[in-house]
Image: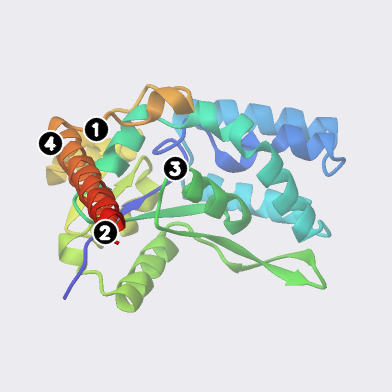
Amino acid sequence: MSRTAAFFDLDKTVIAKSSTLAFSRPFFQEGLINRRAVLKSAYAQFVFMLAGADADQMDRMRAHITALAAGWDVEQIRSIVSETLHDIVDPLVYKEATQLIADHKAEGHDVVIVSASGEELVAPIAQLIGADHSVGTRMVVNEGRYTGDVAFYCAAENKAVAIKQLADERGYDLATCYAYSDSVSDLPMLEVVGHPNAVNPDRGLRRVAVQKGWPVQQFSDPVSLRSRIPTPSGKTVAVTAISLGAVAAAGAAWYGLRRKRGRDA
């Protein structure tokens, strides 16, 4: 049987900032980058929030970050991300995105994060927000350290390539699948599914979405994790109550039978 998936871009679609640039402070505190790089990251984050990033900017950012990361210890990066994930990412996740993810999961759809950020960042963030799978940029590693080369850059056309590969592996019917992104650079990702959606779109993507009649959504409410937990529907509460009642009744019946057997003995 064919299955359905919802593919989400990460930056400015699920979280309010660039996931890669968001970790510049802990990288600085661990001595991986200098103060100038932190300031550069802050400026890049500001520009990204205002205008997004086109294909050329994405390529420049990739080249800058991969060159910067050359020689970094992979396990150290994973450790930093693990230790700082909640403090950095929790305040950035859009409430609207988590509700949409919950809605897809309630429909039985797989949720997949597809991001140009490194897989060492993308996978933990995907797990944090309840996604089933994730795909990120893979860098070349030699003897536990990044070489500065890229094995797979998960951006633009490569996002569509990754989605098609996942569809083949997991049996997704792309005609029934959904995709969400903010950037015109993700058109290949949006066009490969039957239900493309523009979220916080840049000017280029908004123009295409209007021309093609795609839904356009605005996410603007990043809030704390506790506040983001979706409230279950009345139907879910009723089903849960019935299930708990059935368990309680079964337990009472079992206990009564045990007591009766004890007296008969």
- Taking the image as shown, residue 247 lies to the left or right of residue 74, namely left
Q: Secondary structure at mark 2?
A: helix
Q: Which badge, 1 or 3, comes first in the chain's sequence?
A: 3
Tell me if label 3 and label 2 are in contact, CB under 8 Å. Answer: no
**Is residue 104 visible from the viewing direction of this image?**
no
Q: As shown in the figure, which amino acid type bears the numbered disc 2?
A: Arg
Q: Residue at x 68, y 33 (%)?
A: 41
Residue beneath disc 2: 261
Q: Amino acid at mark 1?
A: Pro
Q: Residue at point 18% right, 52% down?
A: 195
Q: Name the quadrant containing residue 169.
A: bottom left
Q: Residues within 10 Å of mark 3 (few under 14, many from 20)?
A: many
Q: Judge the density around disc 4: few (<14), some (14-19), many (≥20) Cα neighbours within 10 Å.
A: few
Report the mark closest to the observer, 1 or 3. Answer: 1
Q: Secondary structure at mark 1?
A: loop
**Distance from label 2 to label 1 (Cα)?**
41 Å
Residue 157 location, quadrant: bottom left
Residues at circles 2 and 1 in contact by the CB criterion of under 8 Å: no
Task: Give the foreground label among 3 and 2.
Answer: 2
Tag nearer the camera, 2 or 1: 2
**Mark closest to the chain's N terminus, 2 or 1:** 1
Determine whether, in the image, residue 234 is placed left or right of residue 153: left
Q: Which residue in the protein does label 1 denote?
A: 232
Query: Residue at point 37% right, 51% down?
Result: 186
Residue 78: percent from the left, percent from the top?
70, 53
The residue at which mark 3 appears reads as 129
The mark closer to the camera, 3 or 4, is 4
Q: Secondary structure at mark 3?
A: loop
Mark 2 and mark 4 lie on one chain; the one further toward the N terminus is: 4
164 and 104: which one is in front? 104
Q: Secondary structure at mark 4?
A: helix
Residue 8 visible in this rendered orientation of the protein: yes
